[in-house]
Image (cartoon, helix red, strand yellow):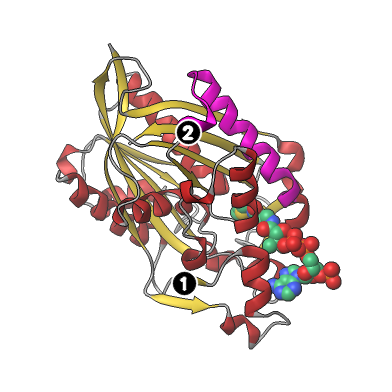
Amino acid sequence: MTIRAVAIGIGHYLPERIMPNSEFEKTLDTSDEWIRTRSGIANRHVAADGETTSNMATKAAQAAIDDAGITIDDIDAIIVATSTPDLTFPSVGTMVQSQLGMTRGYAFDVQAVCAGFIFALTTANSMIQTGQANRILVIGADMFSKIMDYTDRSTCVLFGDGAGALILEGRAGKGTNEDRGILSADLNSDGRYKDMLYVDGGVSTTGTSGHLRMQGNALFRQAVERLSATAHHALGKVGLSDSDIDWIVPHQANIRIIKGTAKKMGLSMDNVIVTLQDHGNTSAASIPLAMSVGKAEGKIKRGDLLLTEAIGGGLAWGSVVIRW
Ligand code: ACO
């Protein structure tokens, strides 16, 4: 018998305010046309004053709990992937725990920037398989609007705010690729590329939270190659191949990266969940948001084989293969 971490509920939250590309035209030398054609983004959601990452995460978590038809008492642990916490500490995880009224179990954060949800999923999978918890709420939540330099047209047009949550439950599987749940994962990082994408502030340096800085073009060149490689590693570990995939659920950073990766994997865009046009890049939230929207639209169905992949600051990148 193999314990599998099976998805039993998914949900998301997006702040009410939608910011279209045209808003940037008022203050920056940019255009709706440039942003759409170079990135694929048309709109992003931006958090209201007073709204926090933990508030967004809690709303997404509640939607996932409702979707699963369980209560917070059924959850053993919470893992939040974020790089934009409310405070330096305590963790967003414990804040969500308190907002959901959970007084047992444990909660913590993981930080792998845009690849955060992949690292959080893999951590949750290991914890379920080793008996540390049976039901884990895995959340990706980020508020990048707070770390944008709104005078830098090469970055501020790309990001948005949001949260997504997935509940994993340990269930007995047969140990074959027909089992529902996480079948394989592949994690990577290479700190030599730290200057390609970073925030220029922090506790032990400037004492400020800083602004995002990115060598977009250099990162773009890394992305397609590394994303298709990690996907192939994860699939290869369990003897699966590209043609077995029903849906790629990619990190939503750039439509050209998404298309390039799908092409390299020999898959059509009909097999890819794309939400980037409406959400922008929501960092650690982008994959669970896309999963949630994909399921709500009736695309992702029980038994489908999903391949999720992401790359972000670190560089850190990876992928997870999951049968829905
Ligand atoms: N409007 C108009 N022109 C712009 C804008 C803009 N908003 N932004 C940049 N430009 C200009 C540049 O100044 C440059 O002008 P120049 O040729 O006169 O110097 C020109 O457009 C081309 O710039 P590039 O950076 O070469 O454009 P590119 O085609 O690479 O697209 C982009 C830029 C969209 C940032 C792309 O490189 C990208 O998506 N990179 C990857 C982002 C990513 O994957 N991030 C990882 C995840 S994020 C995370 O982990 C937090």
Position of residue 14 in the picture relative to residue 157 (left or right) = left
Q: Amino acid under label 2?
A: Val
Position of the N terminus, as image quadrant, is top left
Q: Which residues are magenta?
A: 219-244
Q: Residue at x 30, y 43 (%)?
A: 301
Between 117 and 131, which is closer to the camera in this rendering? 117
Q: Amino acid under label 1?
A: Val
Q: Is residue 109 above or below residue 36?
A: above
Residue 63: which quarter of the image? bottom left
Q: Is residue 132 above or below residue 37?
A: above
Residue 17: which quarter of the image? bottom left
Between 61 and 272, which is closer to the camera in this rendering? 272
SS at mark 1?
A: strand
| The magenta stretch spans residue 230 | yes
Return the residue at label 2.
Answer: 320
Q: CA distance from mark 2 to mark 1?
A: 28 Å
Which of the labelled discs sits on residue 46, or is there none?
1
Which-is-in-front pick, marks 2 and 1? 2
Q: Residues within 10 Å of mark 2 (few under 14, many from 20)?
A: many
Between 80 and 103, which is closer to the camera in this rendering? 80
Mark 2 residue's CB less than 8 Å from ligand 1: no
Which of the labelled discs sits on residue 267, or is there none?
none
